Image (cartoon, rainbow, N blue to C red):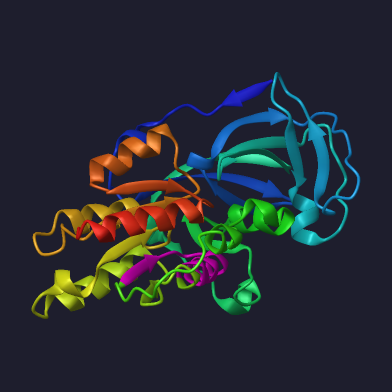
Amino acid sequence: MSDQISNTGILLESGTNEIEIMEFTIDGNLYGINVAKVREIIMSDKVNPMPHTHPAVEGVFKPRDTLLTVIDLPMYLTGVPSDKKDRDLFIITNFNNLFMAFRVHTVEGIYRISWQSIQKPDKIITGGDDGVATGIAQCGKDFVTILDFEKIVAEISPETSIKLEEIEKMGHRERNNSHIVIAEDSILLSKMLTLALSKAGYNNVTKFNNGQETWDYFNTLKNEEGADKKVDLVITDIEMPMMDGHRLTKLIKSDDELKDIPVVIFSSLINEEMQIKGKEVGADEQLSKPEIGHLVEVIDHLLSNGK
């Protein structure tokens, strides 16, 4: 039995600053995942264990023709081996060009809310910068913890994250003082991205935690003469509390003073549907994480064209 996630209307709209959250439970606690990351929900099945893997990796199974790694999400979150139940579900995801399965206990429903309704959790709650909660959303009467699935996968399988070796293989690069603005809510990815850009010669970088903070910064610049000359390029994630990357891109590209600043969407969610949305809001380029080498090549190209 499977529940295929259909392409809902939100995927056809651009820059609405809305998100659809799939709410699920683990041990009675409510968690959420962006529907754009979900491909289907299926009943849990027999999993073949694999040796020498992360403790939260159950193993692999093969529904139809695709071999999938299964992550025991209850084990990952609690550190305690979970009791496998026949009624457990597998959430099949696709992001960072990877298909994976995550074990959960129940799926409660899908809620469509504004990114403004999602707050960044306090560091006391998340355990500091390394917390796995990327946001707290209010879905109806419930507060739902939005999990950072990118961080979970990066921790379990570091080779799937940004590889600094891609930059090192480019050899010696001259310093470039072009001002690059980054909008990225993941502290881990923001640090890695900044380090990678620095290794590539781009060390004049300003970072913001979400699209709203970035847009507030641009509004401050607009009060000064030549705002478009103060920023040379923007790199933005899509999923961010308060304001997502599509909304930020649309605001920049709809502004007469800022529209010539190139915007690169760098996200784990880049697929055919998201490519359409990105084009509609005016993104100059759209790249899937963790292709950092390709990102640097695109930055080089856009800046060399004087865009």
Residue positioned 24% across, 71% down in the render: 231
Tell me which corner region of the image, top left, top right, bottom left or bottom right, holds residue 174.
bottom left
Q: Is residue 256 left or right of residue 30?
A: left
Quadrant containing the N terminus is top right
Total labels drawn: 0
- Of residues 256 and 171, which is closer to you in this image? 171
Query: Is residue 52 placed above or below 109 in the rendered structure?
Result: below
Query: Is residue 145 placed above or below 19 in the rendered structure?
Result: below
Magenta segment's dominant SS is helix
Magenta stretch in the rendered image: 180-197
Query: Is residue 33 placed above or below 184 in the rendered structure?
Result: above
Residue positioned 71% across, 51% down in the render: 28
Q: Can residue 111 be seen in the rendering of this structure?
A: yes
Verify whether residue 193 appears in magenta: yes
Q: How far from the left and from the top, in percent, is residue 61?
A: 79, 30
- Of residues 215 and 74, which is closer to you in this image? 215
Q: Can residue 140 be seen in the rendering of this structure?
A: no
Tell me which corner region of the image, top left, top right, bottom left or bottom right, holds residue 125.
bottom right
Q: How far from the left and from the top, in percent, is residue 230?
A: 20, 75
Q: Is residue 95 left or right of residue 286?
A: right
Residue positioned 15% across, 57% down in the render: 259
Query: Is residue 175 placed above or below 10 in the rendered structure?
Result: below
Verify whether residue 58 appears in magenta: no
- Of residues 230 and 177, which is closer to you in this image? 177
Q: How far from the left and from the top, in percent, is residue 238?
A: 40, 53
